[in-house]
Image: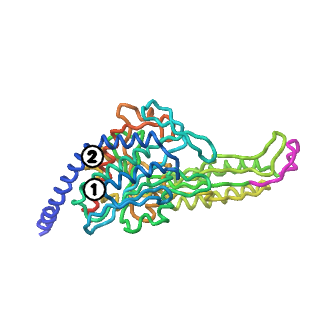
Amino acid sequence: MKKLLIASAIALSLPQVALANKNQDLVAKMAAEIQPDVVKWRRHFHQYPELSNREFNTAKTIAKYLNELGLEVETGVAKTGVVAVLDSGKPGPVVALRADIDGLPVTENTDLAFASKVRSTNNGMDVGVMHACGHDTHIAMLMGAAKILTEMKGSLTGKVKFIFQPAEEGAPRGERGGAEVMVEEGVLKNPDVDVIFGLHISSDLDVNTVEYKAEGIMAAVDPYKIVIKGKQSHGAYPWLSADPIVSAAQIILGLQTIVSREVKLIDSAAVVTVGMIHGGNRSNIIPDEVELVGTIRSLNPEIREHIHEAVHRKATKIAESMNTTAEVTLPLDYQYPITYNDPSLMKQMLPTLHATAGAGNAKLTKAVTGAEDFSFFQEEVPGLYLFVGGKSKDIPAHQAPGHHTPEFKIDESGMELGVKLLTNLTIDYMQKK
């Protein structure tokens, strides 16, 4: 009887397997056909990048194309974001796909024919502007997926929401933006999103490969500031002071013991960094105040909470021991949650990753201490965030230009897999539901 039940279950699943294979073959064919357009779009956005919350022309280009596809398009979301909905006309889940659209204040130094020559103003400074993190490829890949899914509308059940998000790299000083604001403005509502998928091109990962990890894949980020106040004196008479500089030095060393002595590193990595020190104005004056600014990265909610407590404890107690005081501001001006891949969703969609990338090309990866505001979407609905290869296989990984550098480059052939992944994840999730 047990064997009969198993055989029946297999038989019932065969039509679904056949349909999935048929759809994947069709998606692969369409992705190959649209690849020249994807490359063209990517080069346009690369040549004309715009900074966070200033993606006006980028948004216009995206919206124009989505309108041409006949989608319901909304602009001005979180200032410059674009959102479009594809309605299959049949009941089913709402799947969201997200791409970030902003460039960076980086002056490009490549030999590309479509290299950026754009300059702009960032926080009052004249800067070059460059897509130095691959967001231009993210836009193009999502536009490609939108094209294919629109043409396959008859095979879909439910709705697809395409989210083109501004300001992933952080809004200008004094402004807010990005995924957090999109969520506040209701981007995951009307229609209510059931699941969200996103991906990031990687300059040191071989093309035609995808990396994944359940649970925390990118870190929470928590900037902080510590103001140490003491008593000013002449540098020749330090006994008359309460020296905030020496106190700051002790605090910096103390902060480093949080991770090395209080975090169980075999379970999860963490980072406490001091990135700026401001204090004093002459060699022979001990100042009355010093400011430290830094960042915390964590991949586990409990560890994140512990580090926050420990920063306060270390700073205030060490300062007290030095006859100074410490005021801790944490978070400082913004914070990103952990980019957390829902484990059950990861298990459900893993066959799609392997089938789409091919045997041996979907690889389990380790978490990284970089951060992504895609995490704000994942706090609201289950989501997966993946890394897609953008490095030519003939370039050693250690020689690949890094993200956020003037030399950043991507092998454009890697975008074809990104288009297929976004499309197949959508179709397969709908069919599983």
**The quadrant where residue 41 appears:** top left
At 52% across and 50% down in the image, what residue appears? 54
Alpha carbon distance from label 1 to label 2:
13 Å
The mark nearer the N terminus, 1 or 2, is: 2
User: Which disc, if any, is residue 150?
Assistant: 1
Quadrant of the snapshot with the N terminus: bottom left
- Residue 155 at x, y percent in the picture: 22, 59
SS of the residue at dot 2? helix
Residues 65 and 320: in front is 65
| Dot 2 crowding, Cα within 10 Å, few <14, some 14–19, many 20+ | many
Q: Give left or right: position of 74 versus 167.
A: left
Residue 55 lies in the magenta-colored region: no
What is the image's colouring? rainbow
Q: Residue at x 86, y 48 (%)?
A: 233
Q: Which residues are magenta?
A: 228-241
Residue type marked 2: Ala
- The location of residue 365, given as percent across then percent down, is 39, 48
Left or right: 369 as drawn, with respect to 425: right
